[in-house]
Amino acid sequence: MPFDGPLPAFDVRADFWSLRFVDERSESFAVRKNVAMPYVASTDRGAMATVYAEGGYGYAATGDTSATGLRAALERAAAWARATAKHALFDTRTLPAVVPHGSYESPSLAAAAPSRREWYDLLRVESAAAGCDPRIVDWEAGIEVRTATHRLVTSAGGDVVQRYRFLMPGLSVIAHADGVTQTRSLNGYRGICQQGGVEVLARFGFTSAGRRIAEEALELLAAPNCPSGTMDVLLMPDQMILQIHESIGHPLELDRILGDERNFAGTSFVTPDMFGSYRYGSDLLNVTFDPTRPEELASYAFDDDGTAATKEYLIRNGILERPLGGAISQARAGIPGVANSRADNWNRPPIDRMANLNLEAGDASMDDLVASIDHGVLLETNCSWSIDDSRNKFQFGCERARVIENGALKHVVKNPNYRGISANFWRSLARVGNAETLQVLGTPYCGKGEPSQVIRVGHASPACVFTGVDVFGGEE
């Protein structure tokens, strides 16, 4: 795999070309109901050739990374670029020929990883702790580790190598008694996902969470249903990340705003004329695109088109400033964007994707957040989501909630849900937690595009209070 050293000379009749190499390896370990599941490993390698020619754009992927295979891919991409030039949405000759140089490396990349036996031993301990009661009818502890090397080389002389390690642990239990079933997990489905090594587990107390998660599931069995009505809600970070992802992240993707996702996952209620003036939320809402936080899942130095990654405000003091649009979408729309042109693998072209989309911390402690609520609920850990195809009206459910009355946390309730409209909801943001309430989370499973791409996305958020929210519980 050509990750080091010079590449062969390629004589491509084109204005610009690039080769993006990907080598990604995955290992998965799981223990379910105290039984070790089979070890799963995979390796995927290949390259994507991208060519600008005669104003057109073409690409071709190949698993043959020999000089012959790469040359053939470049020639196919060039042929596509010339054949489609007259139908292009923009003239690629207006794009700058990027010349990126640099590198990136995940934290702890050089540190030795646990052996397979050590991973399984760790998971067995958590599994045994989780299966602590006959009412726990199913439980599982698992970890997925991915390592990847990406290299981008351009005809203008650019050369970037980025090396990653992703750690994605999971822990969940299902409890059942007297016809009632409840699920409890550690930060949702793979919500704990960061770059780095075993230190990621320590940040979230993974190695002592099995018993706690089981006890919370049992508590939910006996808990009353969440009350219904209009009230304040305190969203914990593991629910905030879903709220940010669905009702800020996807609506701000510039290719979606331009209509590219209409066939697959809808459009956006955001229009190009809103940038610079539209009030997306209250004055407390500050959202950044930040691929520079080392431990966050989608941190990098350059996107897959070679644009240098920098922190940018998308929403500042509630006002919409900037979309999630890479270089090509920026050229199409005439709007400044960010370095978020990303592909999920070597056999997909980069498109506009969320990377690290974060809500900046405020100044309220956890005690302050709770004390600000006379009548409401604390909601944590997403378990269901639904949002319309313009990413505006939404309905989300959580695993667990606690009633708040007169500024004090009360009893646990089950089956909590809430719904709203994106603009109204974010404008009701009343308190933003401080850095001590913030967690760095994310998802490895964000889907978008045709053909489909499933990509890693990071989200960091503090706990937040929203007022006047429509909350409803389940039925007995």
Image (tube, rainbow, N blue to C red):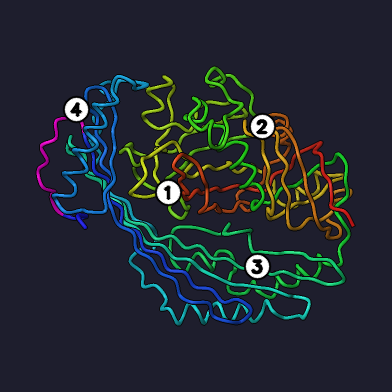
Residue 135, x across and y down, in percent:
78, 76
Q: Amino acid at mark 1?
A: Ser
Dot placed on the residue nearer the N-terminal end, 2 or 4: 4
Residue 178, x across and y down, in percent:
87, 71
Residue occupied by mark 2: 392
Residue occupied by mark 1: 299
Q: Assign a secondary structure to mark 3.
A: strand
Query: Which residue sits at x=29%, y=45%?
Result: 61
Mark in the foreground, 2 or 1: 2
Q: Are marks 3 and 1 in contact (CB under 8 Å)?
A: no
Q: Residues within 10 Å of mark 1 (few under 14, many from 20)?
A: many
Q: Is residue 74 magenta?
A: no
Residue 446, x across and y down, in percent:
52, 47
Instruction: Kindly report the distance in space between the C-alpha atoms of the residues bearing marks 3 and 1.
Output: 27 Å
Query: Which residue sits at x=29%, y=37%?
Result: 59
Q: Is residue 6 magenta?
A: yes
